[in-house]
Amino acid sequence: MKQSKLTLFIFIALVAGVITGYLYNVYVIDQYNTAITNADAKVKIIDTRLVQLTDTTVTEYANLKKERVAVVKARKENDTTREDKLVGFSILSDIFLRLIKMIVAPLVFTTLVVGVAKVGDIKAVGRIGGKTMIWFLSATLVSLLLGMVLVNFFKPGEHMNLPLPDSHLSSGIQKAALSLRDFITHVFPKSIFEALANNEILQIVVFALFFGVATGAIGEKGEIVVKAMDAFAHVILKITGYVMLAAPLAVFGAITAVVARQGLGILSTYAIFIGEFYFSLIVLWLVIILAGFFVLRTRVFNLVNRIKDAMLIAFSTSTSEAAYPRILMELERFGCNNKIVSFVLPLGYSFNLDGSMMYMTFASLFLAQSYGIHLAFGQQLSMLLVLMLTSKGIAGVPRASLVVIAGTIAMFNIPEAGLALLIGIDPLLDMGRSATNVLGNAMATAVVSKWEGDLGSDNGLQ
């Protein structure tokens, strides 16, 4: 009953947020958006003229530089004022997300330690881990391939017909490191306290695996640690219950801020791309549910019903981390063994972000199409493999996918400045892929539980 009420309140908050955001955009924010758009257009004109001037000593060059500084300053002032006007709404979601982030790191650590310690011997950990990684890698490959196939089928970028930008222009998004060394060093924490403080889920998972195996290996002394960690995890889950009461307010604030900032006009401008991407996500949902059906049979539909609140929260806040505590509770109520949930779910948040995977190939090839850059089938497969490696361990937070894309497209000579096409609508796209990440991780956990013969009956709590 409580769950259905929360779902209703979240849905009401979504609708109210769209309406409030639209009205606030029209009557308050529109003037600042217009000023920012005009400033961006001026900067583009000035940049073009600066590139055309070969002699940097002439007076016109100095005047253009001064004019550019003044326009950029004015744009920044309008941008700051706009954000100040939205702070009342965004603070609602900010508080909720900070509370969730407060919970996630200790919850991942304690539940994973308990899960690994309860599994017991290294062979069992390896067996469950092997099954988990088989599902994760398969799901990642399918998501990336599906994104590649559908973006080639729809060809949303061909309608853009953009000229190649000047090489010095940038999107302003920091690129993700692509070197193997950087990836490996990022996986292993130099300090568990630093990892906990920064919510580095992958690093926390690595330490928790070591800690859990060692706890299980010391026998009776380890049982004290397991009981303490288990009790601590239950305390955190109780806190989660309190935090979730604020979810509708957070959803209202997040949606209002997005719509007020972007306006509903952004939907019509990119309607084709947004529509095709969300259709692709629905196809991916069907594939995930169908794959789950082969293992879970009809119970797969009960699982989807159970996690709808968590998916709505992830959708509204644009971060799958916000839904983590909720999925943890619902999977255990669904009948998944605590030790499996505690082991698989944290790993999923680093290795199994299905929605983000699809978006990366979809968005990268969309940019190539927009600039008329033809990528052969072999090049597209190479991009897919690069994304498969560089995306592992990305944070389940807004704009994390853009960082990985920025680092990858440069390898295929796709202009990085093209990401500016996506920045405006990224919050809308991030909602869908975050909800998909939740579905993918919940399905993976339930399937591994079934494979291990540890899937009990649904206890019926709602």
Image (cartoon, rainbow, N blue to C red):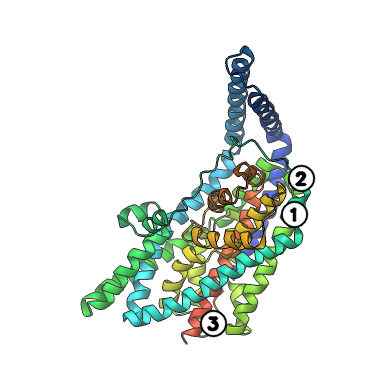
Q: Is residue 48 left or right of residue 135?
A: right
Task: Identify the residue at image location x=69%, y=32%.
Answer: 37
Residue type indicated by callout 3: Asp
Q: Earlier in the sequence, mark 2 or mark 1?
A: 1
| Residue identified by numbered label 3 | 458
CA distance for labels 3 and 2? 53 Å
Count of numbered tags: 3
Eyeballing the image, is 212 above or below 163? below
Residue 325, x across and y down, in percent: 48, 64
**Quadrant in which the C terminus is drawn:** bottom right
| Residue identified by numbered label 2 | 161
Check residue 127 in the rendering and tell me which mark sits there, or answer none. Answer: none
Residue type indicated by callout 2: Asn
**Quadrant in which the N terminus is drawn:** bottom right
CA distance for labels 3 and 1? 43 Å
| Residue identified by numbered label 1 | 156
Q: Residues within 10 Å of mark 2 (few under 14, many from 20)?
A: few
Eyeballing the image, is 139 above or below 204? below
SS assignment at label 1: helix
Residue 78, x across and y down, in percent: 62, 29
Task: Identify the residue at image location x=72%, y=35%.
Answer: 27
